[in-house]
């Protein structure tokens, strides 16, 4: 009986350790992939980019919504420079990705301040960076 209790205890500890290990790796320091970043930020009419663009067109923007979406945008954009490009020069990609991440941070900062002009400017800067990076680094 004693050995059965010990075996069950050991097995329970292993299960708990496995669960904790899975949670640690799921929330670890691994950056999101380029594909995940692009899909999360840009795909669909309800993506952060589409939502922010639409909201900033209003004379009275929904700042709570913009702030929420810009925070998500900045979080994922910060992971882009941590990736390697699918094609092209790595230094060029890292440079463009850093400017993209910085622009996303500026967008979020402007949203938190409810500064419409600065938010629109940061969003415009992000838009100009997309084509430059895609032309040089996106696989076809």
Image: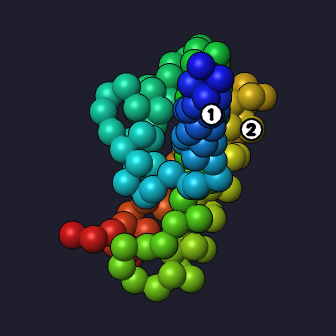
Q: Residues within 10 Å of mark 1 (few under 14, many from 20)?
A: few
Residue depicted at x 59% and y 37%: 14
Residue 97 is situated, as x and y percent measured from the top left of the image, at 56, 65
Residue 124 image offset from top left, x and y in percent: 52, 48
Q: Secondary structure at mark 1?
A: helix
Q: Nearer the viewer, residue 3 or 14?
A: 3
Q: Which residue is mark 1?
A: 10
Residue 109 circle label:
2
- Total marks shown come to 2
Residue 68 left/right relative to 84: right
Q: CA distance from mark 1 to mark 2?
A: 50 Å
Task: State the image coordinates of residue 21 (x, y, percent, origin top left).
Answer: 60, 42
Seen from this angle, which residue lies furthest left?
140
Residue 17 coordinates in the image, percent (x, y): 63, 37
Q: Is residue 7 left or right of residue 115?
A: left
Tell which of 4 and 31 is nearer to you: 4
Q: Earlier in the sequence, mark 1 or mark 2?
A: 1
Quadrant in the picture for residue 133: bottom left
Q: Is residue 39 visible?
A: yes
* Residue 111 falls in image quadrant: top right
Identify which residue is drawn at 56% across, 24% down: 4
For the N terminus, the image quarter is: top right
- Say which residue appears at 36% left-offset and 79% top-offset: 87
């Amino acid at each position: 009986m004693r050995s059965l209790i010990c075996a069950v205890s050991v097995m329970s500890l292993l299960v708990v350790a496995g669960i904790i290990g899975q949670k640690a790796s799921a929330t670890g320091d691994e950056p999101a992939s380029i594909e995940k970043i692009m899909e999360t930020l840009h795909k669909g009419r309800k993506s952060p980019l589409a939502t922010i663009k639409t909201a900033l067109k209003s004379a009275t923007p929904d700042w709570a919504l913009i702030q929420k979406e810009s925070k998500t945008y900045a979080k994922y954009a910060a992971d882009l420079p941590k990736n390697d490009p699918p094609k092209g020069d790595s230094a060029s990609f890292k440079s463009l990705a850093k400017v993209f991440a910085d622009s996303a941070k500026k967008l979020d900062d402007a949203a938190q301040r409810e500064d419409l002009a600065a938010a629109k400017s940061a969003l415009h800067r992000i838009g100009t960076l997309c084509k430059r990076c895609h032309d040089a680094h996106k696989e076809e």
